[in-house]
Structures are given as C-alpha cells and as structure tokens.
Amino acid sequence: MMEQTVRVLGAPMDLGADRRGVDMGPSAIRYAGLAEEIANVGQSCVDGGDIAVPRPENRVPDTEPFETGHAKYFQETKEVCEDVSTAVAGTVSDGEFPLMLGGDHSIAIGTVAGVTTDLNTGIVWFDAHGDFNTPATTPSGNVHGMALAAILGRGPFADTPWAHSPRVPEGNVAMVGVRDLDDSETELLADSDVSVYTMSDIDTRGITAVVEEALAVATEGVEQVHVSLDMDCLDPGEAPGVGTPVRGGISYREAHAAMELVHENVGSRMSSFELVEVNPILDQHNRTAELGCELVASAFGRRVL
C-alpha cells in the first residue's frame, strides 16, 4: 500500500438487512482500536466521521420501485449510497485512501461508485454470500443481498446510475469464501463472468492458492482494485458478531493469510477497503470488531517479521 493518509469513513447502515445491530458496527470497530492498528503499520489516519443514515423506525420498508420484484428501503438506500459515493470520491480527490466501515454490505454500492469515477477497477469480494440477487429474484427484499449485482448493473440496476459502476468489468470481480447462495444466485453467477471461489475450493486448494488466483483475476488489465471484506466470510466461531452468520467459514489464520496476500499482490493498486457487517449486539466482548481491525492491519502491511 502506498504511503498516504487513510481516511476512515463510517456508514451506520442497517436498512439493507433484516437484523438490527450492524448500524453500530462503525462505532464498535473504532472502539476496537482501528486507528491504532493503522498507525502501527506506519500509516497516518484521520477520521472523517459517519455518513448520515435515516433510522428505519418511521420508514416503510417494502417498496415496489421496479416493474417486477421489490427492494426494501430502496429510496433511503439510494440516498445513503449517493452520500457514501460523494464522501469516498472526495477522499480520493484529496489524495487520501478511503477506508469504509459498515453497516451492512449495501454500502459497497456507494463505495465502489466513489472510486470508479475515472479508473477501471477490479473487486475482491470476501463474503459467505453471493450478494447477487436482483429485485426480481430476492427472497427477502434486502438490498445487502443485491449489492454486487447492483454494482455490475444486473437486472434493473443497469438503468440505475447511482448503483451501476460501468468501470468495473465483470471479469475482474472475484468472490472468496462463498458458502450460502440462493438458487437464483447460483444461476445468475453461473451465467456471469464473475469468478467464484467457495469454501470447498479453499478446502481443496488452500487459502493461498485461491486468494492469489482471485487477486490475479481482479487485477488483470485494470488500474486499481477495491477490497470488500464482509466479516461473515469468517467462521462464526472466529467472528460471532456478524449480520448473517454461516457455519463452515474461513479460519482466523486463513483470514490473516488472505489479507497478507492482498498487501503482497495488490500493494499500491488497492484503491479502497471496506469492512462491513459487524454486529456488536451478537458479538462476544467486541471480538469480531477487534479481529476486523487486525485484518485491516494485515491488508495494510502488518507482518510477524
């Protein structure tokens, strides 16, 4: 990673998910010592505060913004993601590195939009889930399960400029740690150019081979790479405080190895980093947020020697 100031931005967003609590994720991550971890790897850090997010109590969750299907809190999500995009683009314009804290994974729509204004961008998406539903296929209507599809302009998102990022070639998107897909996502991903690496791939080939291949996919022919880390990619035994836990995930050491490989293989081409889906209500002594801070440090260059 280049020596540049890291600007931390929070998006206490839980409109894209079913379960409350991830809105407290940015606070939990900061409290866990994020700034100190960044400083310990020799990077200066400033805190840009939080993006304003409307509370869901007085909102109507079910809307029908599309001819087919639905997406909960669609208008509110659009407004928040536009604000996230503006804040991230401003960070890049100021010569600083955007480190985005969630909140649920729907904020990735805004983060990617903010860093893809001028440059073609690959994505490495660490997640237990596909996030590849559309309003027509979603069983829940939760936008955090549509985030990657929205970024790639799938379904009706092709005509949604605030979500679709045309500077992200589909063939430069790699997903790692996947183990919980809806049937519709399986079909959509099979018909896409996205590279999907499941937990079975990691079991068979090992974390190093899988992540190195994923990074090669994401970096080929593009100027920069965005890294999105959903903490539910880890096994719930390591990271219990997440929005949607799924058993059988990445281990503690595998996660650190993956982030170390991000630093080694991407380095100065990493445009942005995102840490999402930390839910302190479900956590144990803030251990998931603390682990998230450690993983950020590994991606930024922390090593044993």
Image (cartoon, grey):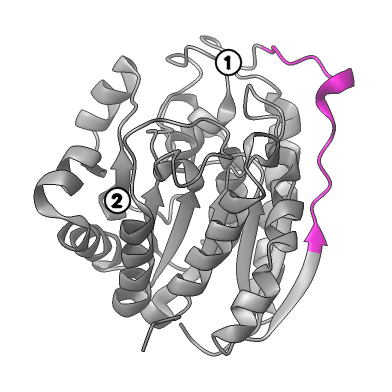
Q: Name the quadrant containing residue 59.
A: top right
Label 2 belongs to which residue? 174
Spot occupied by residue 94 in the image (x, y as percentages of width and height)? 70, 80
The type of residue carrying mark 1 is Phe
On screen, residue 252 above or below 284: below
Q: Which residue is mark 1?
A: 66
Q: Horizontal and vertical percent for residue 255?
A: 37, 58
Name which residue type carries label 2: Ala
- Picture disc at residue 159: none
Q: Quick check: 151 left or right of 259?
A: right
- Residue with the most extreme front position: 285
At which x and y percent is residue 304? 38, 83
In the rendered structure, which segment of residues is drawn in magenta? 49-63
**Residue 61 counted in the magenta span:** yes
Q: Nearer the viewer, residue 71 or 236?
A: 236
Q: Is residue 204 left or right of residue 41?
A: left
Q: Counting other residues with Cα less than 10 Å from the Cα at mark 2, is it few (<14), some (14-19), or many (20 or more)? A: many
**Label 1 crowd (10 A; few <14 / some 14-19 / many >=20):** few
Residue 52 lies in the magenta-colored region: yes
- Element type at mark 2: strand
